[in-house]
Amino acid sequence: MLGSRRSRRRLTTALAGLGLFVTGAALQVTTTATPAHAATTNRVLFDDGHAEEAGNADWIISTSKPDPLSQDSSPSSETDWTGALSSWGVALQKTGDYSLKTATSALTYGGSSTTDLSNFDTLVLPEPNTLFTTAEKTAIMTFVQNGGGLFMISDHTGADRNSDGEDAVEILNDLMTNNSVDSTDPFGFSIDTLDISSGYPAAISDSTNEVLNGAFGTVTKSLIADGTTATLKPADNANVKGLVYRSGYSGNTGAFFATSTFGSGRVAFWGDSSPIDDGTGQSGNTLYDGWNDTGATNAALALNATAWLSGDGSTGGGGGGGGGTCTAAQLLGNPGFESGNTTWTASSGVITTSSSEAARTGSYKAWLDGYGTATTDTLSQAVSIPSGCSATLSFYLHIDTAETTTSTAYDKLTVTAGSTTLATYSNLNAASGYVLKSFDVSSLAGTTATIKFTGVEGSTLQTSFVIDDTALNVS
């Protein structure tokens, strides 16, 4: 209820299980989360169901679909498979760690098709040129939310190769802003409506980044040959990160290559299709060899990013996939608060069924602050994260406020994991409905960390921070 003032009366007593660590009995194996991963095989699906071959585009790894191995079961060079992305596919195939397929029909999740997204770790969208249907957008977003990797490759605005009125910029922005799963800037970036004619965007300096410094080499530069960039919005997703920037740009603008997370999954964005074009393909297409451009390191960028998205252990990856012996699981006890005052440690009245603020699912939620008086509410749980695991913390947050300012954060919610502050929200972030928030907390693997929410409210107008459906997924 927007702007409603909460009764000062506390409805519940101190929580049972105060300060308890999550034990083996509290672990819940996630049945709909991270897709199952073989020990050494990373499963990658390249989309060819959305006009990826229209015009001069030839964004396929092979003309043999869905299985490129039917063209050549043991490729050694890019010409053993036919397609402008054959170098990408062959390089992955030669490692022995990847299983590659091509989708030529509608994308689904949870279906019986051999190219259903539930059978894969990563989906590559190489400059799609037709809009995704409502059902497809739900499938893609759910796939990522549940642990999949999504590689979105755009082109410049106006690159409408099939003349249907839509280009990749519009199509990918539509996926992110007009879907049934989360349309509130879920990845923390939007694709710019630009046509940048040329350039060699440079990588940031980050020796620990797995995409820039992976098993396939070190990334120094990429290539723009009529492409675009992205604008980053870390206030919407704190995990968004620009890795390669257009010359003269940094921070939240001009990101040519960026990564982010959503739910338990990972996301990568590239602002041009020219870097993945290897110059070879089907007869009649005019192609450009950006893959082997000597002024850039496009091959390393594409391959390292694929490994990172897939959770290939060779790059220390996590997120959407896991290496080693980590067992996929959801570690938080009572994640949706439906067991009432158990497992969590909270201020009195925080875990509640009060009808003044609706739960996202079920009857219970955690409601911090909302009194219109000086108040500090806390909600926390200690959790042991196994060594060798990738870990993602996620939760749904609803903020409503009676504050009218558009510039001053009077009331704040701080989210911490151990000693790390993951995010701070305020009355300025108020919005209708719940918004999914997610954070990579893989750095805490091998430790017992306390996940804590702290709401601090000022002395007059109320702000309510309402949390539901938490999760700490490992893989």
Image: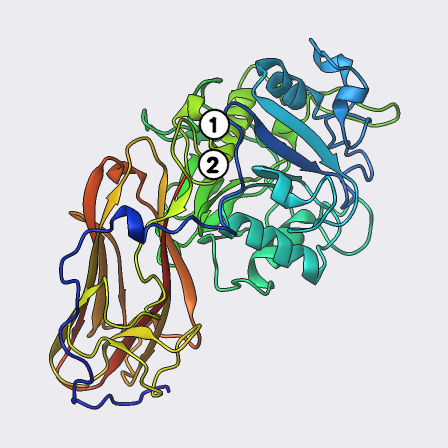
Which residue is depicted at the point 23% across and 82% down? 370
Front residue of 88/129: it is 88
Q: Is residue 114 left or right of residue 331?
A: right
Q: Residues within 10 Å of mark 2 (few under 14, many from 20)?
A: many
According to the picture, the residue beneath numbered tag 2 turns out to be 321
Q: Amino acid at mark 2?
A: Gly
Question: Contact, CB < 8 Å: mark 1 with mark 2?
Answer: yes
Residue 251 image-quadrant placement:
top left
Whether residue 162 can be seen here? yes
Which residue is depicted at the point 27% across and 37% down? 445
Label ID, residue 312: 1
Q: Which image quarter is the C terminus in?
A: top left
Label ID, residue 177: none
**Residue 210 pos. (x, y %):** 40, 28
Q: Amino acid at mark 1?
A: Asp
Q: Which image quarter is the N terminus in?
A: bottom left
Mark 1–mark 2 Cα distance, whole angstroms, equals 7 Å
**Which tag, 1 or 2, sits closer to the chain's start?**
1
Front residue of 346/237: it is 346
